[in-house]
Amino acid sequence: MLHIGCHLSSSDGFLAMGNTALSIEADTFQFFTRNPRGSKAKAIDEEDAKALMELMKVHRFPVILAHAPYTLNPCSATEKTREFARLTMEDDLKRMKFTPGQLYNFHPGSHTGQGAEKGIEEIAALLNELLKPEQTTTVLLETMAGKGSEVGRTFEELAAILKKVKLQEKMGVCLDTCHIWDGGYDIVNDLEGVVEQFDRIIGLDRLKAIHLNDSLNGCGSHKDRHACIGAGKIGLEALTGVINHPRLKHLPFFLETPNDLEGYKKEIALLRGRYTE
Ligand code: FE
Ligand code: FE
Ligand code: ZN
């Protein structure tokens, strides 16, 4: 069974997202914990969160994925920006308690001139401060395209962060196909080699989710411009290979392609049709 969904707007609340997912034949979804540019999040409606958990049980959603705002940067050279990252992630993790056992994904950040090593240290320090033994949320580092001074472009950088985190079992990785392709991992000509590298450097047991996106640009371009499935440089064949890879096919896949709901519904149907049980 292919577990697939897309990014949904969280403005109408949890249960509404669950129902929207069902309406496009998805069995999972991703949402922003708050405005993607940051800012205050509105209060959690506990009953609404419970209603979604019930819907997920009835309709067998494997897990859902919350995404931190893009502005969250725990390794900025600017102290104020790091402080914003700390406060935001702390608050997000509190909010995640209302939807227990789910995934929370964030961009490791941009070191803005401090160097990757310093960045890695600061990201791990924040996680060591905020992760709690009793938490049921799994926190994911997203693989990045390597725009500007982004940390997490290479599997080595992600592994270095993970290695420094004490509560290892609370951590995982979300692999974005557009980002790793733009980052220089050739999933078109050598998916097997890329999966093997991921396993050797990070460990496939750490991989908890996949952002399934095509890319407007070439391998190694470091651009991070998503394209619709089959409309980019990765292409439908390679992405079909990703969802059917024996070591990836059980994972939840999240579309972050430039689509409206109707477009997402079509992509989900297209990929379900190409999935082999
Ligand atoms: Fe992301
Ligand atoms: Fe992504
Ligand atoms: Zn992206």
Image (cartoon, rainbow, N blue to C red):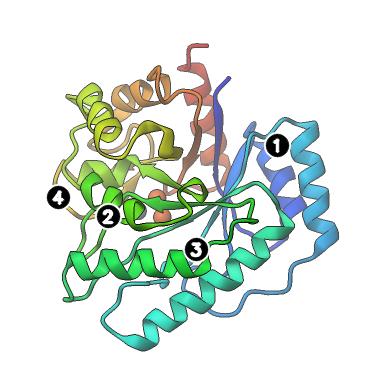
Q: Nearer the viewer, residue 163 or 5?
A: 163
From the viewer's perspective, is the residue at label 2 or at label 3 nearer?
2
In what element is the residue under mark 1?
helix
- Tell me residue 127's x, y (percent): 44, 64
59 lies left or right of 157: right
Q: Earlier in the sequence, mark 3 or mark 1?
A: 1
Asked if residue 216 can be seen in this view, the reply is no
Residue that badge 1 annotates: 22
Indicate the amino acid at tag 2.
Gly
Disc 2 from disc 3: Cα separation? 16 Å
Label 1 packing within 10 angstroms: few (<14), some (14-19), many (20+) = some
Indicate the amino acid at tag 1.
Leu
Residue that badge 3 annotates: 68
Disc 1 from disc 2: Cα separation? 33 Å
Direction right: furthest residue: 47
In what element is the residue under mark 4?
loop
Q: Residue at x 77, y 45 (%)?
A: 53
Q: Which mark is residue 221?
A: 4
Answer with the quadrant where ligand 1 appears in the image.
bottom left
Residue 109 vs 143, above or below: the answer is: below
Q: Are marks 1 and 2 in contact (CB under 8 Å)?
A: no
In what element is the residue under mark 3?
loop
From the viewer's perspective, is the residue at label 3 or at label 4 nearer?
3
Q: Which mark is residue 30?
A: none
Direction bottom: furthest residue: 80
Disc 1 from disc 4: Cα separation? 36 Å
